[in-house]
Image: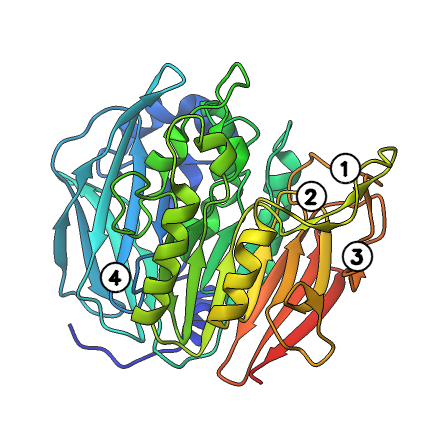
Amino acid sequence: MKNKKMNRRNFIRAATATGVLAVGGTALWQLDLLRGVRDTALRQFPGVFYIERLRQIVAADNAHARALMWEVTSPVDQQMIELRLQGTEDVRRIAAEDARFTDDGTEVYQYTAELDQLTPGHMYQYRITAGDAATDWQPLYTPTADENYKMLIFPDSQSSDYADWKQLAHLAWARNTDAELFTCMGDLVDNGEDRLQWTEFFVGVKEMQRSIPMVPLMGNHETYNLDWKVRLPEAYLHYFKTPRNGSKEFERYYYSFDYGDAHYIVLCTQQKEIGEFKDGLVEEQLAWIRRDLKAHRKRWNIVFMHKDVLQYRINGRPERTEGIDEDNGRVWMPVFDELGIDIVFTAHLHTYRNRGHIYGFEKTPDAKGPLYILTGVAGNVRYPNLWIDHAFDEVTLPQPETDNYLTMDVSRDAIEIACFLTDGTEMDRVRVTKR
């Protein structure tokens, strides 16, 4: 496989113009209006292999590897990934693994494949085959170590009706098709055992998740069963084959990965919920994060965590004081100071807050310490006028808040983060540089 390097942004622009990214039949079969006649239609096109919820998941080193996941409506043997460099016919084949599981009374026929030995800075194409049938080719890009890139960041998509989430995610991707990866900040669904909610969540990101890798986070709502009691996050752990962390008890609960010249740390803040079943999550992560950062030397260090580090006063509850969250802020903020974390993104409170830089539990006008961004809300579960502004807040959105998403542009010299409403209105922009 030989091909010249191509910046992904240039490829996307060219591909959009020429139709390279058109998904053809695969996309048509996923339209809501055609779902009812899908099985009949497929019998008329025997060469088409129909799959659902095709997605890329970040690998530990995305310049050389990637994970793929997808579902089918019934078991299919001998599924393969075919991988080639864009513009070539030389195909490499990788066998798929059966990763089916049962939850909410539904058996999910899910398959995975791990791609390795990829070359940085190249645009690949991949498809899934089964016998003589195949999906359409999809794009897969491997970053170089020092390239500039954009990331999309989605706050909690938890919803009672996922129409707003689907609209926001679709429009965010339509405006940012040059993004190279995206993250969803936890509370992806309202109820972690509800299969229908998961399928609706995936509809929102179906266009981007097959083209660019996803960075999933676990939220507290991923730990709820249908009776709204706490359970282990069974569905979340099956849906996302995240990078390995070396843990015996908490594999896939937390992880890290490299993309370009940034190292990303994805923490699990569900110790209260998970603590009903097994202990040691926080202690294990505290030891792991130090080992992890010693092993990964990048220019930027960025943390994603679901629950927030600050405690807010609440309208109508004068007994609740403003301060630092005891379970997460008091535990993690000194560690972030010690390890030189540049940016910390949080979620959970369904409100956007830019706090600026904090060090030693104090505001630092000289930009010492991490920048803390509370990312907002991307679903329709909103808390209008609930939170009273914190003294650390530098930017808040007008109340009552509606949905928002963020972009993050990463370069060697700076990282620039912007917050947008669904209609594309920019609400905040902040720039981080190295001290």
Q: Nearer the viewer, residue 337 or 13?
A: 337
If you read the primary sequence from the N terminus, does the residue marked by circle 1 or circle 4 appear first?
A: 4
The kind of residue tagged 3 is Thr
Please state the horizontal and vertical placement of residue 354, each as a whole percent of the image.
Answer: 72, 62
Could you say whether the residue bearing mark 3 is in a helix, strand or loop?
A: strand
Query: Which numbered disc flags the more N-terminal residue, 4 or 2?
Result: 4
Q: Decide: marks 4, 2 in contact (CB < 8 A)?
A: no
Q: Nearer the viewer, residue 53 or 418?
A: 418
Q: Which mark is residue 350?
A: 2
Kindly identify which residue carries mark 1.
383
Which is more N-terminal, label 3 or label 2? 2
**First along the sequence among labels 1 and 3:** 1
Q: Residues within 10 Å of mark 1 (few under 14, many from 20)?
A: some
> Left or right of 135: which side holds 263?
right
Kindly identify the amino acid type of the residue bearing the numbered disc 1.
Tyr
Tell me whether circle 2 and circle 1 mark residues in contact (CB < 8 Å): yes
Percent of width and height locating residue 56: 35, 51
Return the residue nearer the eye: 105 or 43: 105
Q: Comparing marks 1 and 4, which lies closer to the viewer?
A: 1
Residue at 33% x, 48% y is: 242
Q: Against 173, is 275 above or below?
A: above
Q: What residue do we see at 25% from left, 24% from top?
A: 74
Residue holding disc 3 = 396
| Residue highlighted by disc 4 | 65
Mark 1 and mark 4: Cα distance apart in space: 40 Å
Asked if residue 78 shows in the view, the reply is yes
Q: Secondary structure at mark 4?
A: loop
Taking the spot 70% from the left edge, 81% from the top edge, the residue there is 366
